[in-house]
Image (spheres, rainbow, N blue to C red):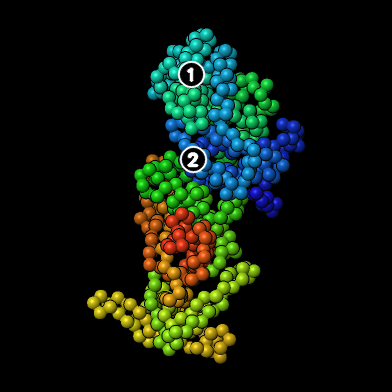
Amino acid sequence: MTEIHPERPVNFIQNIITEDVKNGKNGGRVHTRFPPEPNGYLHIGHAKAICLNFGLAVANGGLCNLRFDDTNPLKEEVEYVQAIEKDVRWLGFDWEDRLFYASDYFDKMYEYAQQLIRAGKAYVCDLSSVEIRQYRGTLTEPGRESPYRRRTREENLDLFRRMKEGEFAEGSRVLRAKIDMDSGNLNMRDPVLYRIMKADHHRTGDAWCIYPMYDYAHPLSDALEEITHSICTLEFADHRPLYDWVLEHIDYSGEARGKPEQIEFARLNLTYTVMSKRKLRQLVEEGHVKGWNDPRMPTISGLRRRGYTPEAIRDFCDRIGVAKRNSTVDIALLEHVIREDLNRNASRVMAVLEPLRLVIENYPPEQVEWLEVENNPESPEMGRRQVPFTRDLYIEKEDFMEDPPKKFFRLAPGREIRLKGAYIIKCHQVIKDESTGEILELRCTYDPDSRSGGPTAGRKVKGTSHWVSAEYALPAEVRLYDHLFLGEEPDGEGQESGDRLNPESLVILKDCRVEKNLARALPGQKFQFLRQGYFCVDEPDSTPQKLVFNRTVSLRDTWAKQKNK
């Protein structure tokens, strides 16, 4: 469950809840809900809402429901329902027996709509969707009443019943609330409550051909579930008067107690990240990414596959806080939080991403030494492991230069370096391909007394390189992920998801070598590749026969540098 950090400021929603409990509102109950629409996968912005809703319930001894807003069968699928449930559980939250769907209440919503018609508060309108927008007016011009607004209660009841029975064509009629066409809030200018959609629903099948709009279904679902605090993002602030209007004009007293209160908070925006579900869907459908769980996606499933931990995501959501105004969070903070988590909890291993063969000529050809190295210097309780040291090794290509610049401290002809956890070596010969000039192999010698405990172990050299045994190392594919977009604000107005894509958001290295111990690595397991970054075993592509690692985040921490300026 989300931890409450008393040293951090209490958010304004918690202050509202504290005051409500103090005054005995709702009998002192606190009951929230997380209400996703199952029309796509959840992203990091939803994680903030999940942590907030479930976290407030936990902090106040209350309850939180998971409720699917399944009112649009054209966009919703069982796949998305299952993915959302998995994501909420993975983040560490449990709705127990409180799993609901808006479709659970379709019968009641239909009855309530009839109640509005009888009260003269709703009518069937034959205007097309285009005409409804035209009649609605603008922010500076009042709306015009529909010519069907004065239909009798009896006529509206009859037409609404026939809409339900499928007598009319899709789009030919809607049910609208009768409120105020002169209202300064466009949402109150006779909003649509029901529309005809002749589509099968993933739960109700073909039982319905009319479906409620979100602004009608949401407050009623909240009321029927006895929600006390209906927490949503700022774009729904202008919808709050309609939320309240629905609850004020429908008598649901026999079904529920109390009236929910809608409270808005600022959504999460991240640099270099698209947060529009429509644009994320576009990325998937246009093939810019390989599915909703592509590690470049900000979806929870994508972050999970990339190696992010639920603890880090919860910590991030806690750190950014809850505000009343929209702002953009630097993605460097998210990366900083995951580094902090993995730095404490991920084992260090050696992996060579672009191998260059190195032969230690004065090392016995058949000899194998099993060197003991620490798994994580930040967490000594994680123990130590043994790695094989042999005559033939691999180091990184970038760790050798034939003609190095002044401040290059790695290996070069005639220069010494230390191999991590092992010996000091010196390069004396470079073997090249005669036709291309490509460096194929380095010939070196080693100082047998320079290992820990030896007579020259304390001898200082400027460079240290990681390595793996050529004989024992395992082949692996390594996927280097970076920001999907080049610009900091790819979610701006007028920009589509394909704009400014980063052509190097994924670089695949197929000929890597990793240490032998990773043969036992499990899908999702996380490691720090020394000097390279944090990586996890890919799920589902990695197998014992083909190891695949995803880079979670690099070692470079730009957020920490910003803080220290």
Nearer the observer, 256 or 391: 391
Instruction: Give how far across and how far down residue 490 sits, in percent.
Output: 42, 47
Chain-order first, disc 2 or disc 1: 2
Q: Is residue 416 above or below residue 332?
A: below
Q: Is residue 427 left or right of residue 112?
A: left
> Which residue appears farthest toward the bottom when viewing the image?
455
Residue labelled with disc 2:
80
User: What element does badge 1 sit on?
Assistant: helix
Q: What amino acid does circle 2 point to?
A: Tyr
- Say how many tags the image has: 2
Q: Answer yes or no: is residue 144 visible.
A: no
Q: Is residue 533 above or below residue 35?
A: below
Q: Residue at x 47, y 14 (%)?
A: 162
Figure quadrant of residue 347? bottom right
Instruction: Give how far across and how far down residue 19 sits, in percent.
Output: 72, 37
Residue labelled with disc 1:
164
User: What element does badge 2 sit on?
Assistant: helix
Nearer the observer, 364 or 425: 364
> Which residue appears farthest toward the left when viewing the image?
435
Q: CA distance from mark 2 to mark 1?
A: 27 Å
